[in-house]
Image (cartoon, grey):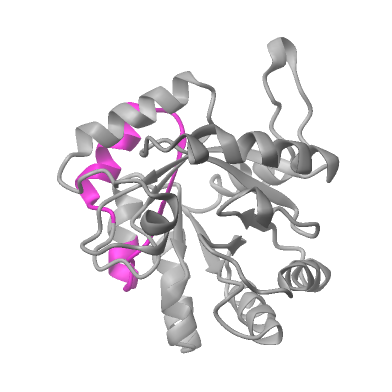
Amino acid sequence: MAQTGVGGLMKIGPIETRLIQGLDKVKSLFFVLLDPDSASADSIVESGLRAVKHGADALLLGGSFIGNPNFTQIAASLKRETQTPIILFPGGCSHVTPGPDAILFTTLISGRNPQYLIDEQVKGAVLVRSLKMEALPTAYMLIESGRTTAVEYISNTRPIPSDKPAIAAAHAMAAELMGQRWVYLEAGSGALNAVPVPMVQMVRASVDLKVIVGGGIRTPQQARERVEAGAHAIVVGNLFEANRDESLMRDFVSAVHG
């Protein structure tokens, strides 16, 4: 678990250190998002191990809505089977569960719903600390993607317009000033359109935060374009649930790692 340092600032923990050091070896990191509600527990674990086999740098586990009673079992099984970081990506405090190595401790800064700006974080903080789970402080930005996504519906927030990169950059600046270390530009699960390249470029140029980009990325070329625009990590999830072609995953890893 990350320890509190001078002035109350949270020190970087071993998982975050590992990810940052990984960027010395590759152009960008490749994260695979596993949705606990997408399939059986065994199938989800199998998908995660397949991703690790082909070079995923971390497995994100979670989603906007989780109704799978085997969620904790999935997290524990993945951790037993691989040394690759398992990072919880919760939609709320009720999703915090034992098993993962770390958590994206997110605040939905693109929205104005206090439940996802601070309420869920206050409730989740006690659980994260009691589990001694490493937290990666992450500013989460929902970007308009051409359709209403699950996270937009569940969070009751409006996304940042995809043609307004300056607005996204301003939010990222605020996040940096508030002490966040990562910023996640998210088009949403099942998005029609990925986060635009110009938005990735402007956010990267505006802050020193590590930039994660996910949602709507369907081809290795799309992933590569966002890496070239400055993304430190690319997230792909739904695509691999529908397409189990292992050569496609290898192509994604190659495109992202550079």
User: Which residue appears farthest toward the left when viewing the image?
Assistant: 163
Q: Which region shows up in magenta?
A: 195-223
How many marks the image carries: the answer is: 0
Task: Please say if 80 is above or below 205.
Answer: below
Task: Please say if 36 is above or below 128.
Answer: below
Q: Residue at x 53, y 67 (%)?
A: 32
Instruction: Tell me the quadrant of the picture where the C terminus can be found.
Output: bottom left
* 179 vs 56, nearest the viewer: 179
Q: Residue at x 76, y 22 (%)?
A: 4
Where residue 77 sits, quadrant-wise, is bottom right
* 1 vs 127, nearest the viewer: 127
Task: Please say if 168 is above or below 243.
Answer: above
Q: Residue at x 79, y 60 (%)?
A: 99
Residue 106 in picture, x, y percent from top left? 54, 41
Q: Residue at x 59, y 62 (%)?
A: 62
Residue 142 in picture, x, y percent from top left? 35, 48
Residue 123 in picture, x, y percent from top left? 68, 39
Asked if residue 153 can be seen in this view, the reply is yes
Asked if residue 258 can be seen in this view, the reply is no
